[in-house]
Image: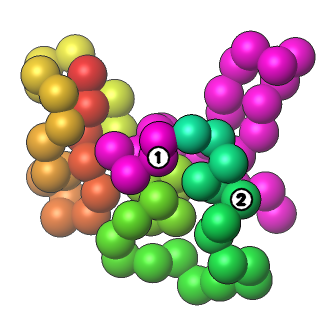
């Protein structure tokens, strides 16, 4: 199953969100597959990062996994 998709070359879709470890979209292709969901890094963040209007920048998530971002 894909961890992310780009629709019409413009819209980025992922279960969670973006990662501070992604510099370019090609970084997503470097994720080894098949894989268990890692506890840290791009693979984790694509599944578990959360947007939040109350945060400024990257903050560790209250869940202790990934980040909350504005």
**Which quadrant of the figure has residue 56?**
top left
Query: Is residue 27 at least partly visible in the picture?
Result: yes
Horizontal arrangement in the rendering, residue 22 relative to residue 67 (left or right): right
Task: Write the start and end of the magenta stretch as one range.
Answer: 1-23
Looking at the image, which residue is at 51% across and 55% down? 47
On whether residue 60 falls in the magenta region, the answer is: no
Horizontal arrangement in the rendering, residue 33 relative to residue 18 (left or right): right
Quadrant in which the C terminus appears = top left
**What colouring does the structure picture have?**
rainbow
Estimate the x, y position of residue 38 in percent, counting from the top left: 45, 78
- Alpha-carbon span between mark 1 and mark 2: 11 Å
Give the answer, above or below, for where 21 lies relative to 8.
below
Q: What secondary structure is the stretch in magenta mostly built from?
A: loop
Query: Is residue 48 at least partly visible in the picture?
Result: no
Which residue matches tag 1? 22
The label shown at residue 46 is none
Give the answer, above or below, for where 59 lies relative to 34.
above
Look at the numbered disc 2 and give the secondary structure of its residue: helix
Which residue matches tag 2? 29
Estimate the x, y position of residue 13 in percent, counting from the top left: 67, 33
Look at the numbered disc 1 and give the secondary structure of its residue: loop
Give the answer, above or below, for where 57 lies relative to 42.
above
Q: Residues within 10 Å of mark 1 (few under 14, many from 20)?
A: some
Q: Nearer the viewer, residue 59 or 15?
A: 59
Looking at the image, which residue is at 26% across and 48% down? 67
On whether residue 10 falls in the magenta region, the answer is: yes
Q: Nearer the viewer, residue 34 or 30?
A: 30
Estimate the x, y position of residue 10 in percent, counting from the top left: 74, 15
Quadrant in which the N terminus appears = bottom right
């Amino acid at each position: 199953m894909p961890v992310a998709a780009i629709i019409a070359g413009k819209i980025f879709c992922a279960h969670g969100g973006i990662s501070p470890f992604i510099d370019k979209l090609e970084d997503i292709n470097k994720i080894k597959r098949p894989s268990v969901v890692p506890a840290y890094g791009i693979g984790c963040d694509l599944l578990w990062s959360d947007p939040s209007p109350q945060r400024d920048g990257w903050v560790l998530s209250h869940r202790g996994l990934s980040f909350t971002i504005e």
